[in-house]
Amino acid sequence: MTAGINILCYKSKTLANGEHPLMLRVCKDGKKKYISLGLSMAEQYWDFTKNKPKPNCPNKEYIETLIADKIKEYNEKVIEFKSENKEFTATTLIEKVAKPTKKKTVGEFFLEQIEQLRAAKRTGYAQSHYHVYNSLMRFNGHLDIYFSDIDIPWLKKYEEWQRGNGDAENSIGIRFRTLRVVYNHAIEENIVKEEYYPFRKFKVSRLHEVTAKRAIVKEEVMQIINYNYTGKDFYIHLAIDLFSFSYFMGGINFIDMAYLTHDNIMDTRLVYKRKKTRKLIKLPLLPKAIEIINKYKTEDSHFLFPILSTFHQTEVQQRNRIHKTIAKVNRRLKNIGKELGIDKKLTTYVARHSYATTLKRAGVSTSLICEALGHSSEKVTQIYLDSFENSQMDAAMQNLL
């Protein structure tokens, strides 16, 4: 694993000023690599036998100090490789020195990522990161470690620890997927080198349990949409209307509905960005959806639905209000489902799944709409929804009626 590191005046190249560049040469396994020091020198000032400046060289002390520092930097990196028993080439040695990783622990970087998500108002995603951070803290006792410490044996121990706690398969998978996302960001920000990446061999995709389908058939959807809520309380009205709106408008989820304003209506289309994936969604406003919007239209609110108001200014207030409202709405939907004899537990998310499966059962191409809008295919689905012409989407969505 030894490497030869020395400085030479590169006579093979002559610069415009007649001088030769000073180069650092790394020799390893019979291969040589050169990197410029950013200095040049007239050949009369260089001792080619001893590979150092002659006594009469201008700025001799400065040049000798720079050379000594550079050689020391490379030798220290070689020692680091040896201590970790890691192989390296002349090329990778130069890359390591030229692009050093920033010293930052897993804990520090995790908390930075959480703060960035909160600043971007992706509070739900930030919260899921925070849950994983807490899980890792409980497992390891601390996160004052570097990402290079997270290797395959470490990941296997973390998996075993979660199973020992009786955690569900999908919960374990979600934590590992989040950890993988954070690790990828650490690579992008040069916190850890890509060669340490453990998830090529530690497959997260196996940590997935197929859950029961949440979709209901079209006839059951119509029972809910046509449910007679005359004389019922406000939240039963809201539950039916939001379920219906979600079904008619691309399976839009509750959080995205909560933030919709009249500005999201553009030329008879609903245009919005998903909170979770940041994908831009454009869908035709079906007549039933327009009826629901008009029902809740008031002069003193710019929101489409009475979930958020001007009172809810902060992220915390908005999150708390959404959480309370969705709990009330889903409680009503659950009771309505029992009343109608529907054997699945009704939530607003059932409308999202039912939207997708209804189009699928109607023969709509899977390239236009995926069979489900769930965990593994949700992002792909949104990409497809974005990429088709409005006319194709308009025609496809007529199958909902």
Image: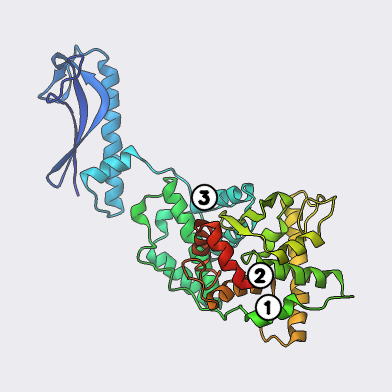
Q: Judging from the image, what secondary structure is the residue with disc 2 in? A: helix
Q: Position of residue 397 (x, y in %)?
A: 60, 67
Left or right of 186, for residue 329: right
Q: Amino acid at mark 1?
A: Val
Which is nearer the eye, 26 or 212?
A: 212
Tell me where residue 155 sits by quadrant. Answer: bottom left
**Residue 139 seen from this side:** yes
Residue drawn at x 14%, y 43% is 31
**Residue 141 seen from this side:** no
Q: Position of residue 39 (x, y in %)?
A: 26, 22
State the residue position of label 3: 109
State the residue position of label 2: 247
Q: Decide: is 228 above or below 250.
A: below
Q: Estimate the spatial distance between the alpha carbons at disc 3 and disc 1, rounded to whole Å.
A: 45 Å
State the residue position of label 1: 221
The label number, if any, that marks residue 232 in the structure image: none
Mark 3 or 2: in front is 2
Which is nearer the eye, 20 or 154?
A: 20
Residue drawn at x 77%, y 48% is 313
